[in-house]
Amino acid sequence: MTAPTLAPAPVRRAAFVALGVALVHTIFGGIVRISGSGMGCGDNWPKCYGYWIPPFERMDLIIEVMHRYLAVALFVSIAALVAAAWRHRAQPSVGARGGVWGSARLALGLWFAPALFGAVTVFTGNPPWATVVHKLLAATLLGVLSMAVVRSGSLGGAAALAQRGSTKAVGGATAAAGLALLVVLMGGLTAKIAGAAVACVGFPLCGEGSLGGGAQHVQLTHRVLAYLLVLHLVALVAVFRRRAEPAPVRTAVTVAAGFGVLQVVWAAWMVLGGFPGVVRSLHQATGILIWVSAFITAYLARIAAGRSAIALSQSAIGTADTEVYAVQTAAHLVPDARARLPRG
């Protein structure tokens, strides 16, 4: 395998910007839900009461409109990533199999899914199932943009190609990413079902004085899954260090575990402090960061184990380079050998 190379700087910057805007947009979507601003523009979409820029007279309207504006900013940032990748598609790290070009195009296509489903959410009255689907689409887009950043060589992508990891790490990290996504979706469902967000007044379990019923079961299920996720991430930190997994994989899982521990702190503060809106927003934002960092951990583990498209592509490029070098060397050696042969 040849030494992995970073994608050109414009591609790396565009990938980082797109991922950053996507994170802000998704986190702000949680604020829309927590503040009850999902119907701030009524059943009007894409305009707000007939305006592209409505009078900013109500806070729920302002929050909903800002979320829509962020969706436009996200489209522009992804389009810029696609343009940068297209210009540099001749570079193997961009245009080859597993390069940034493929994930950039996929991200552009995925932008339309949550954007259009936002209209479905509005027209159907913002029901819980629509919120969960919307959250799933947004999380998928975050995963694809994270993949684009890693494929550009950033966030440990280039270093993971240069090191060798185990297939066991792939299994553990993939399980963590799957569980993180499930917790995020359950968090969205908990926030939307009436009474579920405040159904448990105790911590770490529900405790006396809780609401009981189906809302409490939803809340408690969300908590148990979150506890299992944090324990799994902390265990992976220890296991990956003991097995001497590649440094990028160990760093990514440590970041994910750190966010997991912080999430428990936010949860305790939120419940015992009377569910303040600011802490609820911090709680859902940290959940998104856990998902992204867990996804990056799983993807880096796959790259290091040679089980991703980018790893296979780099391996093929390395083999081709070796063959070219052998041919060039033979071409130089043959004339030299002929020159040393005795004349006549």
Image (cartoon, grey):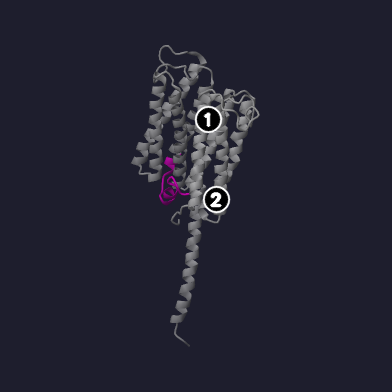
Q: Quadrant of the N terminus?
A: bottom left
Nearest the viewer among 76 and 11 is 76
* Sooner in the amino-acid sequence: mark 2 or mark 1: 1
For residue 84, which numbered disc appears in the image? 2
**Residue 210 in the image: above or below residue 120:** above
- x and y, in percent, of residue 66 in the image: 55, 32
- x and y, in percent, of residue 36 in the image: 54, 22
- x and y, in percent, of residue 53 in the image: 60, 32
**Residue 199 in the image: above or below residue 116:** above
Image quadrant in which you'd find residue 109: top right
The secondary structure type at the circle numbered 1 is helix
**Left or right: residue 112 compared with residue 332:** right
Q: What separation in Å lies between label 2 and label 1 (alpha carbons)?
A: 28 Å
Q: How many neighbours does mark 2 have within 10 angstroms: few (below 14), some (14-19), or many (20 or more)? A: many
**Residue at screen point 47% across, 79% down:** 338
Tell which residue pokes out farthest to the bottom in this image. Answer: 344
**Residue at screen point 41% across, 40% down:** 252
Q: Is residue 160 magenta?
A: yes
For residue 29, which numbered disc appears in the image? 1
Q: How many neighbours does mark 1 have within 10 angstroms: few (below 14), some (14-19), or many (20 or more)? A: many
Can residue 237 be seen in this snapshot?
A: yes
Amino acid bearing label 1: Gly
**Left or right: residue 266 compared with residue 178:** left
Amino acid bearing label 2: Ala
Number of residue marks = 2
For residue 77, which numbered disc appears in the image? none
**Left or right: residue 13 compared with residue 122:** left
Residue interval drawn in magenta: 152-170
- x and y, in percent, of residue 80 in the image: 56, 46
Nearest the viewer among 137 and 228 is 137
Can residue 151 be seen in this snapshot?
A: no
